[in-house]
């Protein structure tokens, strides 16, 4: 078994894979527990802080606030990005899509003032900032997916006698849905990692980002790590949920990926 | 001429078709006609192979025939003497694309729905065709789950959901093992012989497979003296006239091998202008 998991480019079964994951997690926990760095709180302290934050520190409501924020920003971001990416099949819209994509090089800091004026601050400001941050990247990914549709696929659907809207539906919308969900999934992870920064801008509304920054300000390291663990775990749950959604909506995708890997190995 | 065979009206005429893409001439005054093959006591459609070296413009010609590309000049005329209606033309692309997000049955049903059939009729037709081409047991499978041969049969079936008088096949023999090749030639013959006016046009560079299945071979080429010119018809071989069409080719293997050799020579000598026959 040892030689099997150490040899490069070898496939391992699910059981071996599970053993490997558990092994690495145990190793990471051991390193953490035995770490000589005194500023790093021990796992037991973090668990204690997590329990306190949950029952007395209002972690539950803060998490709800954050989830509400990410859901609103994700909805806005997906709608805007899909409209721009799918619209890029129309030559007149293409420059707008390319322009929005290029805005990803702008930082959020300089945009704080105009966005505050436009939204009036608070929750709307945070949604606007997060939406902006996510949309510029999501548009880039989605526009590339649309641009990579082979010309032959479009001609093929036309050869069935399909109208142009039907061609777009079959090739652009339905034909790329699995890759679209995957791009959104990556973008949610990116948005989730921006949460602390965005919630730090308007702390009065709360959220786990604001909670984290407040704990950090008072140098409560056990609480800081407890919030970080929650951010990580919720992020993983969201990621798993999006993966499950992709499998449910696009069951063909798993056959395609195995088909591609078989073709590339043959 | 094969005994009992004769010719009827022209069912497909490609007349003076020229195509330019960007600054490049792709096709140059391509002209050929497909005539209705008549055999005593048998319904016989037409199978025409467009042969030529890779990159000569065969697929471009197929796209013009399918109405996917408009020629710079020239026209494609159908059986009734009118311009060929693209809706009566089916096109099976190389590598047999299908809608990857739909099951095989759905692929066929969608083709029917797009063509104006109602749901129950489209489903009936889909089941009928899947059974006919031998993929009915794969109805609930996705295209990525099928082998190359099965995918090809599904792609042909999809194009047959609606009544097609002309079926175009782009490189249908490439990458097939002998058994799958045999299946494809049988399927092509079956589709062609379903109706007297059915025409199957095959684009290929596989001379042997083309000779096995066709009644007419159109050889496309580009003359070395005409630099910058597009491809045009270099020769046409009427296998019925030569007594080598249908099952007669199998009875005269030497004559078929000689013709195959001659055609392959023409592949290597693009500048040859003399007609072979």
Image: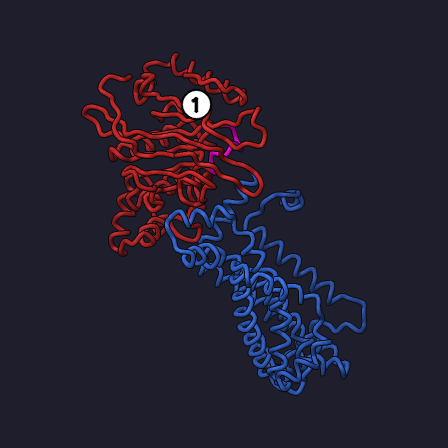
**Quick one: quadrant of the N terminus of chain A?**
top right
Q: Residue at 52%, 40% (x, y): give it.
A: B20
Please tell me whether mark 1 sits on a helix, a strand or a loop.
strand
Q: Residue at 47%, 17% (x, y): give it.
A: B274
Question: Residue farthest to the left?
Answer: B41
Whether B240 is drawn above or below A128: the answer is: above
Whether A15 is drawn above or below A124: the answer is: above
- Magenta span contains residue B59: yes
Whether A235 is drawn above or below B153: the answer is: below
Residue B91 vs residue A117: left or right?
left
Chain given the colour blue:
A
Residue A38 vs residue A127: left or right?
right
Q: Nearer the viewer, residue B214 or A249?
A: B214
Q: Position of residue A185 (x, y in %)?
A: 56, 63
Chain given the colour red:
B
Q: Residue at 73%, 76% (x, y): give it.
A: A110
Q: Quadrant of residue A165?
A: bottom left
Q: Position of residue B177 (x, y in %)?
A: 44, 29
What colour scheme does the image use? Answer: by chain
Instruction: Answer few, some or many: residues within 10 Å of disc 1's Cα (few below 14, many 20 plus, some between 14 and 19).
Output: many
Task: Answer whether residue B136 is visible to the viewer in this image.
Answer: no
Whether A80 is drawn above or below B89: the answer is: below
Q: Position of residue A159 (x, y in %)?
A: 40, 47
Letter of the chain that mark 1 sits on in the rendering: B
Q: Residue tagged by mark 1? A: B235
**Quick one: quadrant of the C terminus of chain A?**
top right
Q: Position of residue A39 (x, y in %)?
A: 80, 73
Task: Answer whether residue A262 is visible to the viewer in this image.
Answer: yes
Q: Residue at 31%, 20% (x, y): give it.
A: B240
Provide the residue span drawn in magenta. Answer: B53-60
Secondary structure mostly seen in magenta is loop
Q: Quadrant of residue B189?
A: top left
């Amino acid at each position: 078994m040892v030689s099997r998991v150490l040899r490069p480019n070898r496939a391992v079964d699910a059981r071996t894979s599970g053993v490997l994951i558990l092994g690495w997690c145990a190793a990471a926990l051991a390193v953490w527990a035995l770490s000589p760095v005194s500023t790093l709180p021990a796992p037991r302290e973090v668990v204690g802080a997590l329990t306190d934050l949950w029952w007395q520190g209002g972690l539950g409501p803060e998490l709800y606030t954050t989830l509400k924020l990410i859901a609103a920003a994700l909805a806005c971001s997906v709608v805007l990005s899909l409209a721009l990416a799918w619209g890029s099949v129309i030559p007149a819209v293409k420059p707008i899509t390319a322009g929005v994509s290029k805005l990803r090089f702008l930082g959020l800091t300089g945009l704080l003032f105009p966005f505050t004026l436009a939204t009036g601050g608070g929750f709307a400001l945070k949604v606007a900032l997060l939406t902006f941050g996510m949309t510029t990247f999501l548009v880039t990914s989605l526009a590339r997916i649309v641009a990579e549709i082979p010309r032959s696929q479009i001609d093929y659907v036309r050869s069935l006698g399909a109208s142009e809207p039907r061609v777009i539906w079959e090739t652009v919308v339905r034909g790329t849905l699995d890759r679209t969900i995957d791009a959104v999934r990556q973008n949610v992870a990116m948005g989730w990692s921006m949460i602390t920064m965005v919630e730090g801008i308007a702390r009065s509304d709360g959220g786990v980002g604001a909670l984290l920054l407040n704990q950090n300000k008072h140098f409560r390291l056990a609480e800081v790590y407890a919030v970080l663990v929650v951010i990580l775990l919720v992020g993983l749950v969201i990621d798993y949920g999006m993966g499950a959604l992709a499998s449910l909506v696009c069951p063909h995708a798993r056959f395609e990926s195995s088909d591609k890997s078989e073709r590339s190995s043959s | 001429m094969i005994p009992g065979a004769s010719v009827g009206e022209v069912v497909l005429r490609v007349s003076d078709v020229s195509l330019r893409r960007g600054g490049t001439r792709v096709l140059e005054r391509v002209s050929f006609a497909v005539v209705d093959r008549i055999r005593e006591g048998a319904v016989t459609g037409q199978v025409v192979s467009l042969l030529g070296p890779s990159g000569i413009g065969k697929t471009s010609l197929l796209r013009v025939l399918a109405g996917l590309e408009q020629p710079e000049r020239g026209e494609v005329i159908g059986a009734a003497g009118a311009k060929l209606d693209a809706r009566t033309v089916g096109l099976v692309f190389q590598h047999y694309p299908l809608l990857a997000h739909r099951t095989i049955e759905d692929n066929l049903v969608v083709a029917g729905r797009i063509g104006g059939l109602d749901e129950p009729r489209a489903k009936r037709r889909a089941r009928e065709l899947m059974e006919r081409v031998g993929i009915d047991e794969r109805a609930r499978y996705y295209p990525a789950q099928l082998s190359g041969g099965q995918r090809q049969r599904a792609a042909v079936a999809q194009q047959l959901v609606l009544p097609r008088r002309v079926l175009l096949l782009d490189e249908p023999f490439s990458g097939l093992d002998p058994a799958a090749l045999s299946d494809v030639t049988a399927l092509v013959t079956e589709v062609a012989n379903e109706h007297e006016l059915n025409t199957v046009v095959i684009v290929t560079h596989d001379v042997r497979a083309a000779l096995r299945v066709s009644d007419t071979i159109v050889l496309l080429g580009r003359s070395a003296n005409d630099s910058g010119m597009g491809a045009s018809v270099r020769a046409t071989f009427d296998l019925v006239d030569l007594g080598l069409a249908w099952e007669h080719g199998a009875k005269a293997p030497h004559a078929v091998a000689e013709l195959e050799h001659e055609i392959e020579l023409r592949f290597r000598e693009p500048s040859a202008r003399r007609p072979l026959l």
